[in-house]
Image (tube, rainbow, N blue to C red):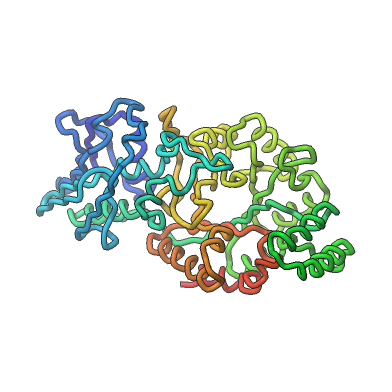
Amino acid sequence: MLKIFARNHQQPEIKYIIDILISEYLGLEYQLIENEQNEHYIIVLPNDKHLTIQNHFFSKFKELDYLDIKNIPQKILYAKNRFTPENDIPVLYGTSSVLESDNSINCGLDIFASSFFMLTRWEEIVIKNRDKFNRFPDDKSLAHKADFYYRPIVNEFLEMLWNMLKYLGYDDERKACEYTVKLTHDVDHFRRYDSFRKVISALGGDIWLRKNPLLMFSTISDSLLSNLKLKLDNYDTFDFLMNVSEENNITSHFYFIPGIKGDYDFRYDITSKKIIETIYHIKNRGHVIGIHPSFETFNNAEKFNLELNRFKKIAGEIREGRQHYLRFENPTTWRLWNKNNLETDSSLGFHDDVGFRAGTCFSYPVFDVLSRKKLALKESPLIAMDIALKTNSSGFKEFNEKLITISNTVRKYNGRLELLWHNGNLYTYNWSKYKDRYNDIIKSLIIK
């Protein structure tokens, strides 16, 4: 068993991040012990060798005093030594120095504070900027500013920590992890042509958005044939998505908006017979149903509870999901999910690009920084989204290359690649070439 000595060993923030890295991620047994004589973290191995992780952050503050924009790193250093899993590693807090001997290592990088910063997203509380959807802007994050958002740096910190322990002779096995793909589908729209208004809207989009009036003939044809039940609606891709997932031995997770007519941003009526039949069809095929709470719910307990209870009456027990538009308010949104006994949220992802908003490709129990409590809720970070990939690519080739690159990064750290592919982004004009290659895309993420 590892013995970890810390000056403020009862501080909730310290207990949380040590438990996440040592127990949750590495799966190692440890004992956290008070040590008032040394401000740094000292990890004593069973062979009595020592690993010191310098404390450059929490030793400076009491309780919530650290929650200030001035405490966000202004300049990122990069360290390189025999323990780093990459050519360099970002130093958020601390120094790049590593001093080693046969019996000890003194690491200047404050691995615990740096990981806490990324996982808890406390910078999103102290930075007040918001975009037009009241979301934290991607480009205001430290990861974007310092250009390491495409790296799961918490996983890198973890590997560095593990490598130092192994160097000092720690011989127990770590927790076994395997690369996996979690394929999710936010059902923002259920049917494209189920009303005259939607047909007119699609025709208008052909002219003004897609700037291709000739598409109007295809739109009219699709709407007539689908309403006459001679072909599937363009958004009715549920069986197609499940077929591809089953062919690749993975599970699809479909997240539905539990709206009804009259709700703000109404998309479809969750109580309609066709939608209920689709939900049970998905469940009967062994795939997962989750919740996609609507636009106004991310910080509104009344609306959130109303939609969740409405959805449970239709779909039964709900354990997971993702907020609509990736709207997330820290820690309000996590509190809503946790209070309602939901197990996993997947809202924490970049909306404008791929990458690691929380700095990790592992799921983890979240921490409410304001109440200073570890919650039962787990975050399964969104790594890549179809729309963001397409927006940032010149065409299919670059789209596929970006996805393969980030999947290889996740694979290197035996993490989970959480991919969002909307059910509506397959049969429409702008996505037709992706539909034809969708199976190949998913297969390329699975094969070794």
Mark yes or no: residue 112 visible: yes
Position of 51 relative to 226 (above/below)? above
Q: Is residue 319 left or right of residue 100?
A: right
Q: Position of residue 409 (x, y in %)?
A: 40, 63
Residue 68 figure quarter: top left
Q: Position of residue 408 (x, y in %)?
A: 42, 66
Numbered marks: total: 0
At 68% from the left and 51% from the top, the residue drawn is 188
Q: Is residue 100 left or right of residue 12?
A: left
Q: Position of residue 378 (x, y in %)?
A: 49, 43
Q: Is residue 320 left or right of residue 171?
A: right
Residue 58 figure quarter: top left
Position of 139 relative to 56 (above/below)? below
Q: Quadrant of the N terminus?
A: top left
Q: Is residue 244 left or right of residue 444?
A: right
Q: Nearer the viewer, residue 447 or 99?
A: 99
Residue 306 figure quarter: top right
Q: Position of residue 53 (x, y in %)?
A: 21, 43
At 83% from the left and 65% from the top, the residue drawn is 220
Mark yes or no: residue 46 visible: no
Q: Nearer the viewer, residue 101 or 230?
A: 230
At 30% from the left and 55% from the top, the residue drawn is 159
At 86% from the left and 67% from the top, the residue drawn is 225
Position of 373 relative to 289 (above/below)? above
